[in-house]
Image: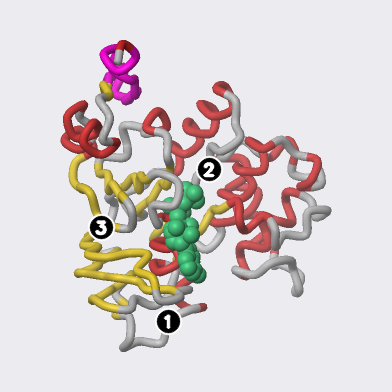
């Protein structure tokens, strides 16, 4: 079991941010975490990465039971987190290659000289992600799509059992988004589970067989993406009539025309 949450709730500053969360992720499953702004996605990710502890409920991540085992750093070394929030902590003048390398230490920046083995691993990863051509460029000179590839490369350095992609396509144009999604489908493997966080259904690739819908801090529905991403369920989720159109195994969301007439 990669993630197991049972009736988990999180209270911050006297307010319930998350409540009644039940979620199980099995090894090799790839999940979408979908929710609107303020739904609690970041709070949920922070709990999975052991930055926050649940106020109520039972929680287990990568076999570690919260409250029983020593968590934090050791657990986070097994999770590859790709988040725009992370960018704020990077030395942006470092080269793309150095940033990928720094993933081997699960730290920001490089304090020890990396072994040849680690350097070779970084090169292999960058090649796989198509980012080798800009390996020597400073991170802050890269486009948003290139930066995301570098952050994914960094997250892959420690062979994570769980990869969390927190809104990786934010700020990307259509072409850059699709290129990034192609890259993401390349990193899918049976040995790893991915959680892809988004507020855009258009980003949901067929490899994301499961989806968890979060609404106002509570689980709205979860299960197979095909069962969750239906016009009926999504209309109920938005409290607005919408149509989910499946095209080439990918969903698109459209407002029902009747709404415009109203
Ligand atoms: N430390 C805190 N104290 C009080 N409220 C908080 C705290 N952290 C988050 N919240 C509130 O909890 C709710 C969920 O926030 P969260 O950032 O997890 O949402 P999100 O789904 O990630 O949103 P977005 O898509 O906009 O990033 C928000 O209303 C937020 O203001």
Determine whether, in the image, residue 89 is placed left or right of residue 228.
right
Please provide percent x and percent y for residue 240: 27, 30
Please provide percent x and percent y for residue 44: 39, 62
Looking at the picture, tell me which residue is in the foreground, 114 or 145: 145
User: Residues in magenta?
Assistant: 245-260
Separation of disc 3 and disc 1 at Cα?
Answer: 19 Å
Looking at the rendered structure, the secondary structure element under dot 1 is: loop
Looking at the picture, tell me which residue is in the foreground, 253 or 156: 253
Please provide percent x and percent y for residue 185: 42, 36
Please tell me how crowded label 2 is: few (under 14), some (14-19), or many (20+) other residues with Cα within 10 Å: many
Please tell me how crowded label 1 is: few (under 14), some (14-19), or many (20+) other residues with Cα within 10 Å: some
Residue at image mark 2: 168
Is residue 82 placed above or below 132 in the rendered structure?
Answer: below
Determine whether, in the image, residue 138 is placed left or right of residue 84.
right
Determine whether, in the image, residue 228 is placed left or right of residue 64.
left
Is residue 25 placed above or below 221 in the rendered structure?
Answer: below
Separation of disc 1 and disc 2 at Cα?
Answer: 26 Å
| Badge 2 vs badge 3, beta-carbon distance below 8 Å | no
Magenta run includes residue 257: yes
Looking at the rendered structure, the secondary structure element under dot 3 is: strand
Looking at the rendered structure, the secondary structure element under dot 2 is: loop
């Amino acid at each position: 079991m990669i993630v197991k949450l049972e009736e988990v709730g999180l209270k911050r500053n006297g307010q319930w941010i998350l409540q009644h969360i039940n979620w199980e992720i099995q090894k090799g499953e790839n999940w979408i975490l979908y929710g609107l702004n303020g739904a609690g996605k970041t709070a949920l990710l922070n709990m999975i990465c052991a930055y926050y502890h649940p106020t109520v409920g039972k929680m287990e991540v990568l076999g570690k039971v919260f409250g029983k085992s020593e968590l934090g750093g050791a657990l986070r070394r097994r999770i590859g987190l790709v988040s725009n929030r992370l960018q704020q902590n990077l030395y942006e003048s470092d080269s793309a290659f150095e940033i990928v390398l720094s993933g081997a230490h699960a730290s920001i920046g490089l304090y020890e000289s990396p072994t040849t083995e680690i350097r070779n691993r970084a090169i292999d990863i960058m090649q796989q992600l198509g980012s080798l051509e800009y390996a020597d460029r400073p991170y802050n000179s890269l486009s948003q799509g290139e930066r995301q590839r570098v952050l994914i490369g960094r997250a892959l350095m420690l062979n994570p059992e769980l990869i969390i992609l927190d809104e990786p396509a934010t700020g990307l144009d259509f072409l850059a988004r699709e290129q990034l999604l192609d890259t993401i489908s390349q990193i899918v493997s049976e040995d790893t589970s991915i959680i892809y966080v988004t507020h855009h259904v258009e980003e949901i690739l067929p490899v994301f067989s499961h989806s968890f819908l979060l609404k106002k801090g509570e689980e709205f529905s979860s299960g197979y993406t095909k069962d969750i991403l239906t016009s009926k369920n999504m209309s109920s989720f938005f409290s607005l009539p919408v149509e989910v159109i499946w095209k080439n195994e990918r969903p698109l969301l459209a407002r029902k025309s009747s709404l415009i007439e109203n």
